[in-house]
Amino acid sequence: MSVTRNPSNTKGTPVEASPAAAEVSGQAAGSATRVTLASAEAARVRPQRSLWGNAWRQFRRHKLAMAGMIVFVFFVLACFIGPLVYTEAYFSPFKYPTSLGVASSESILNLQTGEEESKFFFFGTDSMGQDMLARIFFGGRVSLSVGIVAAFIAIGMGTAIGAAAGFYGGVVDSILMRITDLFISLPTLPLLLLITFLFRESIVNWADDVLGAGQLGTFILIVGVIAVLAWMPTARLVRASFLSMKEKEFVEAARSIGAREHTLILKHILPNVMSPIIVAATLEVGSAIITESSLSFLGLGFPYDVPTWGAMLYNAKDLLQFSPHEAVVPGTMIFLTVLSINFIGDGLRDALDPRKSH
Amino acid sequence: MGRYLIRRGIISVITLIAISMIIYSILFLAPGDPLGELAANPNVSPEVRQRIRESYGLDDPLYQQYFKWAKAYFIDFDWGQSFTSRIPVKDYLMNRIGVTLSISGTAFLLGILIAIPVGVISAVKQYSWFDNIATTFAFIGYSIPTFFSGLLLILLFSVKLGWLPFIYNADVQSFWGTIKQSIMPITVLALFSSAQLTRYTRASMLETIGQDYVRTARAKGLKERLVIVAHAMRNALIPVITIIAMQVPGVVGGAIITEQIFLIPGIGSALIRAMQSKDIPVVMAITFGIAILVVVFNIIADILYALMDPRIKYS
């Protein structure tokens, strides 16, 4: 079992457990008991650590995961706090830059007023003379929010459906699982494109009337569609965990002292199946960011005046010869964000894995 | 097995019908009048417009329109005509599927051919330099969106070095020309699919190597090579092969973005074009075609599993 205890062992392990995993966990159970005895002895000499404290200790040992965490937190803070400090406009068209490049001093001609200004731009400007750094900040806000909110909704839906199916079983289970199977068979990307394409305009109009902010409509639509097409793996995962957990003695004990159903689900079972849910949620943030960027890259996400990272790539793809940095900067942001999220997910999986000793 | 197949078949047909209903309803509920242009034309009187609407059955309730469409689609195999190119949808797609299959299919096969040996070696030599490089590459390939890796390749090989053409030109007939313009799209897709598969193969192989029967094989004095290839790999690849089967529909789906980057005239770019020009019959055919692929390959994956793994019994 020495292999499984190494923190970087499961680097390549995908979320889905393969059939052989059951047998491995069977073996691990034996060593887990030995470990518990050992740690019980150790507890006498050092103060007890909480479950999450243990996970955090384990997580910190995973260097790449820590690096990913630092990068991701930095990006989030930069995008949400950056614009407060760096107050350049992210959308100010009708300008003409005289040179294009990263970290360069450029003179920009304003086509509306005829004035010319010279300035230093950290990420350069785009072909319309707009400050790239300001656009990266604003685009990051949108891309990161879409990713986080969509993942949150998708995981919430998946958890609710999976928990209901696993806990109640019987008819509820078979109906919910048939629906899950149906959704898994849906062609995800074409449907995403189709729905955003068909409903974007009317939902923007609706949001303009009702909420007073049209692009909030695009946000709701994109987040909603991504979530509705992404909850299924979590539902299956949570159902499987609930099925095995509800047979455990502690649930029986809680039931026998008269715990109500929702107490059983929320207080007794759910906390015990949180680990895989947290890992799935982390990875889902990354894939939701990629999905949103893909939509925007195909010209079906946010419109031009809302510069998400994907939309910036969409604008840049025809200008590769003249201003390659316009594609490289937002593309690198997407790549680094997703990479760091995947590393975090990997580290969390190792840290929260009950098969490992802490 | 036979009974299981029949049951799976029935469930799949029901699933497909449900999917067709969902897609049809989305199109039906979408805002915008299919006769929008006609309505804006002042030369068409309201009575004429009304008659046209009735002749198309546009005022019928949703379910009636659906049944009419379903009958044409599934029973008469009449997929309609493309609005924009004025040829039957079937011919339109037939013209384009060849390119998609040759690019995405090659990339997928290449991805498998790279992923399986790399994943196996990676697991056998865990923590070696080979394993470290392979897992890092797999992680990067898995995290980099295809649209960005595609643009980077264009930047490097077309803009900076000028070795490869920017975009795909369907009129190029020469063998060398076709190869040259296919290199980048194939690389992008192969990188992505091999990254995923490498991770699966490595994980599955690692689990198998730790099994008792592998230790037994070693203990009875078999050569290491034989232990790995005949004992461990044969079993480790079972889940990998089912995952490969389940990824096949994704080959067409994944082509959507790549074809858009390199302007390849395949199924994926046809879908985007059809959406932008509201060419509903083409949109419907492609979306539903991918749905059929997903359902069919899910069954194939299950059958493969049953054939390869005698522990699994279906009833």
Image (cartoon, coloured by chain):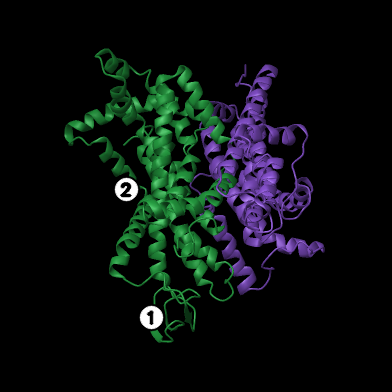
Q: Which chain carries label 2?
A: A
Q: Residues within 10 Å of mark 1 (few under 14, many from 20)?
A: some
Q: Name the residue at the top extreme.
A: A256
- Nearer to the camera, B110 or A142: A142
Q: Which quadrant: the N terminus of chain A?
A: top left
* Colour of chain B in the image: purple
* Colour of chain A in the image: green
Does dot 2 land on a helix, a strand or a loop? helix
Q: Which chain carries label 1?
A: A
Q: Report x, y in % for residue B94.
A: 78, 48
Looking at the picture, which amino acid does disc 2 mark?
Answer: Arg
Residue at image mark 2: A60
Looking at the picture, which amino acid does disc 1 mark?
Answer: Phe
Residue at image mark 1: A120
Q: How crowded is mark 2: few (under 14 residues within 10 Å), some or many (20 or more)?
A: some
At horizontal 35% and vertical 19% (from top left) the residue drawn is: A248
Q: Report x, y in % for residue B217.
A: 59, 28
Above or below, comparing residue B244 to residue A253 in the picture: below
Above or below, comparing residue B262 to residue B162 in the picture: above
Image marks 1 and 2: residues in contact by CB distance under 8 Å? no
